[in-house]
Image (cartoon, rainbow, N blue to C red):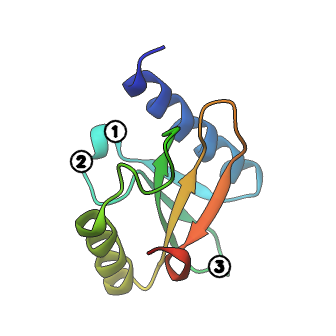
Amino acid sequence: MSAKARGIARERQVRDILAKSDWLCFRSPASLGCADIVALRDGSRPRLIEVKATAQGPFERFGPAARAKLAATAKMAGASAELAWWPPHGQLRWLSEAEWP
């Protein structure tokens, strides 16, 4: 499976996990927006989520400029900015903006 296909599959898996917890999720194909997934649920703070499936680490392809853009957009929307890092053969790990370098 190519890196692109793996990334798309991980985005769909994260979306499906959230949907099972009653989140309404929208995926932004081809990363046309600042986040891969927008998640909404009544009574919960909206979530803007970047999904990464890199083996080298959560921030290997989520650099400072992308992190700043996601954080600024989330603030503007009253949402939380999150990274869902799910490396090949690993476990899904949620990283809030407070945990980013």
Toward the front, the furthest residue is 56
Decide: is 8 above or below 33: above
Label whose residue precedes the other's in the sequence (1 or 3): 1
Contact between marks 2 and 1 (CB within 8 A): the answer is yes
Contact between marks 1 and 3 (CB within 8 A): the answer is no
Amino acid at dot 2? Leu
Give the CA separation, mark 1 to mark 3: 24 Å
Image disc number at residue 32: 2
Where residue 15 sits in the image (x, y, percent)? 59, 46
Where residue 84 sits in the image (x, y, percent)? 56, 55
Image disc number at residue 94: none
Amino acid at dot 3? Ser
Q: Nearer the viewer, residue 88 or 29?
A: 88
**Dot 1: element:** helix
**Dot 3: element:** loop
Amino acid at dot 1? Pro
Which residue, given by chain and number where applicable, does mark 3 sit on?
Answer: 44
Toward the top, the furthest residue is 1
Q: Residue at position x 66%, y 42% from top?
A: 16
Q: Nearer the viewer, mark 2 or mark 3?
A: 2
Q: Nearer the viewer, residue 17 or 2?
A: 2
Q: Residue at position x 64%, y 62% from top?
A: 94
Around disc 3, counting alpha carbons within 10 Å, would you say few (fewer than 14), some (14 to 19), or many (20 or more)?
A: few
Around disc 1, counting alpha carbons within 10 Å, would you say few (fewer than 14), some (14 to 19), or many (20 or more)?
A: few
Around disc 2, counting alpha carbons within 10 Å, would you say few (fewer than 14), some (14 to 19), or many (20 or more)?
A: few
Where residue 87 sits in the image (x, y, percent)? 59, 39
Image disc number at residue 29: 1
Q: Residue at position x 69%, y 30% from top?
A: 89
